[in-house]
Amino acid sequence: MSCYFRHIKDTLSEAGIEISAANKKQVDQLIHEIVGVEYKNCSKTWSKLKELKQSETTWAEIKEKLKSRWAEIN
């Protein structure tokens, strides 16, 4: 599992995303895309997520993007 998934488990759950062995790579790629970090750069992605979590409004927007994009691809 990606290095940051455990830190955003609640957010993923609220967005209707349940991580499984079958979808974890797809979720990881989606998160990288949303935060604008090259795929497979886990530490940079986690740094960006921590930065975005500082603003409740921004974090709510990230959660909505996750929810809508996940619904589009599934």
Image: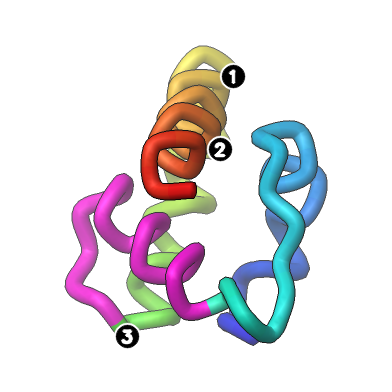
Which residue is located at x 61 percent, y 71 percent?
Answer: 4
Nearer the observer, 65 or 45: 65
Mark positioned earlier in the residue sequence (3 or 1): 3
Identity of the residue furthest to the top in this view: 57
User: Which x, y percent locates residue 8?
Assistant: 69, 54
Q: Which mark is residue 40?
A: 3
10 Å crowding of disc 3: few (<14), some (14-19), many (20+): few
The local secondary structure at tag 1 comes to: helix
Residue 36 part of the magenta segment: yes
Q: Closer to the camera: disc 3 or disc 1? A: 3
Which stretch appears magenta? 25-39
Mark positioned earlier in the residue sequence (2 or 3): 3
Which residue is located at x 50 percent, y 23 percent?
Answer: 64
What is the spatial separation of the Cα atoms under label 2 and label 3, in whole angstroms?
Answer: 20 Å
- Quarter of the rendering occupied by the N terminus: bottom right
Q: Closer to the camera: disc 2 or disc 3? A: 3
21 left or right of 64 in image: right
The local secondary structure at tag 2 comes to: helix
Which residue is located at x 78 percent, y 44 percent?
Answer: 13
Q: Please report contact status of discs 2 and 3: CB closer than 8 Å, yes or no.
A: no
* Residue to which mark 1 is pinned: 56
What is the spatial separation of the Cα atoms under label 3 and label 1, in whole angstroms?
Answer: 26 Å
Quarter occupied by residue 61: top left
The local secondary structure at tag 3 comes to: loop
* Residue to which mark 2 is pinned: 53
Amino acid marked by disc 3: Lys
Amino acid marked by disc 1: Glu
Amino acid marked by disc 2: Lys
Which residue is located at x 37 percent, y 57 percent?
Answer: 30
User: Which x, y percent locates residue 72?
Assistant: 39, 37
51 left or right of 63 in image: left
User: Which x, y percent locates residue 33?
Assistant: 26, 55
